[in-house]
Image (tube, rainbow, N blue to C red):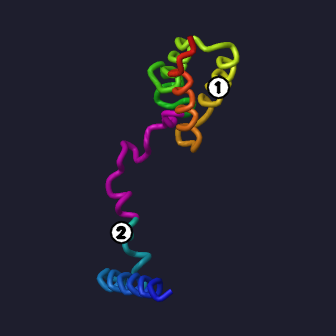
């Protein structure tokens, strides 16, 4: 508890030091000033994109993304080709088909994505013949 109090008092003193360094606008001139606060000036001084807005594109792993959804060199199609070439028995092929369908619908940011990819890679590497 004492350590936490020390950390909080250190933060408060640092904030007070930073506030003391910033010049404060005169009272009544806030409406007349053309000077925007610092956090607004960062983004409005020079737009990062022509016209100020980013181009309308989807995320790379979502439908409508830069690849258009048909990424033939992506992780899932490559894995699918490896699994087809592995010569899986009927039961294993049924399970792999179901898991590939799940993987295609899943975002790579999903917590289960990498686990599912590892599982399918493991299935492709097993000696089925």
Between 56 and 87, the one lying in front of the other is 87
Q: Position of residue 25 (x, y in %)?
A: 36, 82
Tell me if 38 is positioned left or right of 107 in this view.
left
Assess whether residue 66 is covered by the magenta stretch. Answer: no
Q: Nearer the viewer, mark 1 or mark 2?
A: 1
Instruction: Check disc 1 and report its element: helix, strand or loop.
Output: helix
The magenta-colored residue range is 40-61
Residue under numbered circle 2: 38
Q: State the predominant SS element of the stretch in magenta.
A: loop
Point out the tag, 1 or 2, that comes first from the N-terminus: 2
Is residue 39 positioned above or below 53 on the image?
A: below
Report the residue at 56% width, 27% height from top.
Answer: 120
The circle drawn on residue 101 is: 1
Is residue 34 positioned above or below 15 on the image?
A: above
- Mark 1: give few (<14), some (14-19) or many (20+) Cα within 10 Å: few
Between 8 and 62, the one lying in front of the other is 8
- Which quadrant of the structure image shows residue 123? top right
């Amino acid at each position: 508890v004492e350590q936490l109090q020390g950390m909080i008092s250190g933060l408060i003193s640092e904030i007070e030091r930073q506030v003391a360094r910033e010049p404060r606008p005169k009272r009544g001139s806030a409406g007349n000033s053309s000077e925007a606060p610092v956090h607004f000036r960062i983004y409005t001084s020079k737009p990062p994109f022509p016209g100020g807005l980013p181009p309308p594109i989807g995320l790379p792993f979502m439908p409508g993304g830069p690849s258009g959804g048909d990424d033939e060199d992506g992780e899932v199609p490559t894995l699918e080709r490896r699994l087809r070439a592995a010569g899986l028995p009927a039961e294993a092929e049924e399970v792999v088909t179901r898991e590939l369908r799940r993987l295609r619908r899943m975002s790579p940011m999903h917590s289960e994505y990498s686990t599912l990819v590892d599982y399918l890679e493991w299935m492709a590497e097993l000696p089925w013949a």
